[in-house]
Structures are given as C-alpha cells and as structure tokens.
Amino acid sequence: MTEKKTWSDRFESALHPAIARFNASIGFDIELIEYDIAGSIAHAQMLAHTGIISASEGEQLVEGLQQVLQEYQRGEFQPTVDAEDVHFAVERRLTEITGDVGKKLHTARSRNDQVGTDTRLYLRDRIGKIKTQLREFQRVLIDLAEQNIETLIPGYTHLQRAQPLSLAHHLLAYVEMSQRDWERLTDVAKRVNISPLGSGALAGTTFPIDRHYSAKLLGFERVYNNSLDGVSDRDFAIEFACSASLIMVHLSRLAEEVILWSSEEFRFVTLKDSCATGSSIMPQKKNPDVPELVRGKTGRVFGHLQGLLVLMKGLPLAYNKDLQDDKEALFDTVKTVQACLEAMTILMAEGLEFRPSRLQEAVESDFSNATDVADYLAAKGVPFREAYNLVGKVVKTSLGAGKLLKDLSLDEWKALHEAFEADIYEAISPRQVVAARNSYGGTGFEQVQQALDMARSRLNSDT
C-alpha cells in the first residue's frame, strides 16, 4: 500500500501507485531544493518575528532546515518518488529532525505560494548567471574584433555579395544583439523579483504574517499585491523563455555563419581540432558540430516558450496542477541557454581561426564596390539614380567580358562618363570602400574603433 500523504486524511485510501508516480514532481523539482530551503528559512524567521511561533521554535526550524541542506549537499538526503515533491520531502525530513516543531513550518503557507517563491528564487539566480555568461561572450567577441579592425570580409544581403566590411564591424553586430539580450534579462529580472510568499493557497491567511519582512529576507524588491495573482502568475517565466529564445536566435545566426564560413565554398575560417569532429566514414571531413548543435537546440527553447504560452492560456484563477509542468520547460530552457552560451564563447575564443588572405581574395573578386562607383559619380554632380543606372550597365558589360570593375582601363571609364578620373581606382579599392563608410554606426575604420571603445566601456561599467 502506498504511504498516505499529508493531505490524505480527507481520503479513505492512498493513491494508486501509477497515479502517485504520474502526480509526483520530485524527479525534476529537486532542482529547487536549495531555494525551497532558503524560502522556508525566511518563512520560519517571519513566523517567529510576528510571534506566530516562539523565537525558540523559529531557531529550531532554521537549524533543522540548514541540516537538511547540508545532508542534501553531502548526498545523504536523496528523496524518492514517495516524497511527491521537493516541498513535502524537505518538510518531512525536517520533522524527522525536529519532531513536532517541524510540523509548524507550514503555518500560514501553502504549497501554491511556496512553489511560486522557489521558482522565482531559482530563476533570479539563473538570470544572474546567464547575464554573466553574456558578458563573457561579448568580451570574447570584442577581443576578436579588436584584432580584426582592418581585416575585410564580404558583407551580404539576401546571401549575395553586397559590400565589403570590416570584420570587426561584423563581429560587433553580435555584441549589440547580446547587449539587447543582457538588457532584456535585466528587465525581466525586475518582474521575477516579486514575492508571492504569504499569498497562501489563493486568498491570503488569517495569521498576522508580515509578507514584506520575509520578502526582504529573501532579497525580493516587493510583494504581489493580489494573492490570486501571486499564486497563479507565470508571466515572468514566459518573459524569460521569450528572452531566452532571442538569445538563441542570436547564437543560432552566428552559428549559421560559422558553418558557412568553414565550408569549402567560403573558406573564411578554419575550425580548430578542439571544437570540431570528424566523419565516421570520410577521413577528410572536419565537421562544425558546435555551431550545428547550437542551431539545433534553438528549436527546443522555442518549443518551451510555445509550451508555456499554451499551458497558461486557458487556466482559470487561481492555482491549477497544470502549473507543475512549467518546471521542466523552465529548467531545460535555462540549461540549454547556458550550455549554448558556454559552447559558442569557447568556439569564438579558441575554436576557429579567420583566414585573412582568403578574405582579402574574396573582397577583391566581386562587384561589391559597384555602389561606390555610383557614389563617386554622385559626388561629382551626377544625379544618383542616373549614376546607378549607368553602373548597372557597366556591371552587365563587365560580366559579359569576364572583367571586374578594377580591370577596366581609364579610357573605358571615360567612355562611360566624362566625370571619371584616375582616382576611381582608389575609390573602388576594397579598403577605401570600407574606410569611406564613416557615418555613425557604419563600417568605416574610425567608426569601428569608436564602436569598440564604446562596447568595451559598456562592458566595464556593466550597464
């Protein structure tokens, strides 16, 4: 016969064993144990502070909870499915240690506000860790950019050669994306850092608790104003999943570029052995497994976001057992984002090497300087649209002749328009094409250096 639960005096028999297993969450919510104990310690201290229990009882509860934590950390306390969930497991072990005093811990508290508190403590902690990882990812990209201000790389639109860029400028685009990720998490953390503790099951409690006192002990900035909202709100989890999805979008975009760059068709980077694998049948292969896995794992994070949205969309107030299913989605999202950030940071720091000679060859073998010919004419008074159409014809003629723009003679240029002079060759050289784009936020070397300085300053100020 399965052991009767704390709530089962209302019932004549225990749960069916299969239903007990189906109902249990201890297999995954054990992840919350340290946060559950922290929340329980604060709750016990609040009970003593308000006189609901004696100071001596409060001390016994705190000491007992600290012992449970130490036992768990030493591997001596390992709850199984019969504990149902982490909250009951901790309370049961506490009662074994302290006797009847342990039974007073749940005074003025429900598992509904308890699990909400634990989840927020967990996510607040993990958001801090992810923000630290984002900063390290940015630092690696900034260091790499600083080494490659004057390294040129083809820029693309529609995956077609568009205009040459400073490689640093390209890398700094991802620094800006990850800065938005950092800022989003900072904003989400504000709504994570609200205490539901003391909301009870849904309606508050008859005991004279001090919710602000326990919130302060736990480092929460404020408390939920409405007890129904306090126990049923999971907006913060959805917001986090959305922010996490955008982090994965950005990692996946960079991953896709690394995959392309490392292909034989591009050959912009060489993958180092520390971050690549081989084929089981083709000995010449070096596979970009790290970026491929990041690209693949992005989908599972998106899936968790969708799952959380669907989970919440039809729930009436207040708490419903459906909310048990938010944990696995949340935990896996956190672990996936952290693992992918770590892997991509290592890959960019030490797993690949850019090939400047190949990059230089690439920017010199296309028509990505065509816009600069039109700009050249426009600067000499030719209406831009007229210049644009003229250059389009030049490109078409050059392609037919198997030439690049740099291969045209000065006579050929003058035959096209009298405004062309010998300085056209300098104007369309890849380095000048990049340097000339000195508008704010552009790829010009001066702008890139300013952007680097700004990014480094922002990194150091942690804002």
Image: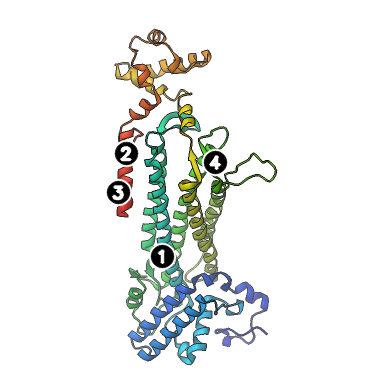
Question: In this rendering, is residue 414 above or below 52?
Answer: above
- Quadrant housing residue 14: bottom right
In terms of sequence position, does the residue under pointer 3 or pointer 4 come before the other? 4
Q: Which amino acid type is marked by label 1?
A: Arg
Q: Which residue is mark 4?
A: 259
Distance from the alpha carbon under mark 1 to that under mark 2: 35 Å
Question: In this rendering, is residue 22 above or below 208?
Answer: above
Q: Which amino acid type is marked by label 2?
A: Gln
In terms of sequence position, does the residue under pointer 1 or pointer 4 come before the other? 1
Q: Are marks 3 and 4 in contact (CB under 8 Å)?
A: no
Q: Which amino acid type is marked by label 4?
A: Ile
Q: Which residue is mark 2?
A: 449
Q: Are marks 1 and 4 in contact (CB under 8 Å)?
A: no
Q: Is residue 279 visible?
A: yes
Q: Are marks 4 and 2 in contact (CB under 8 Å)?
A: no
In terms of sequence position, does the residue under pointer 1 or pointer 3 come before the other? 1
Q: Which residue is mark 1?
A: 124
Residue 332 image offset from top left, x and y in percent = 53, 61
Which labelled disc corresponds to residue 328?
none
SS of the residue under disc 2: helix
With 316 as the anchor, is 4 left or right in this view? right
SS of the residue under disc 1: helix
Q: Which residue is mark 3?
A: 457
In terms of sequence position, does the residue under pointer 1 or pointer 2 come before the other? 1
Q: Residues within 10 Å of mark 4 (few under 14, many from 20)?
A: many
SS of the residue under disc 3: helix
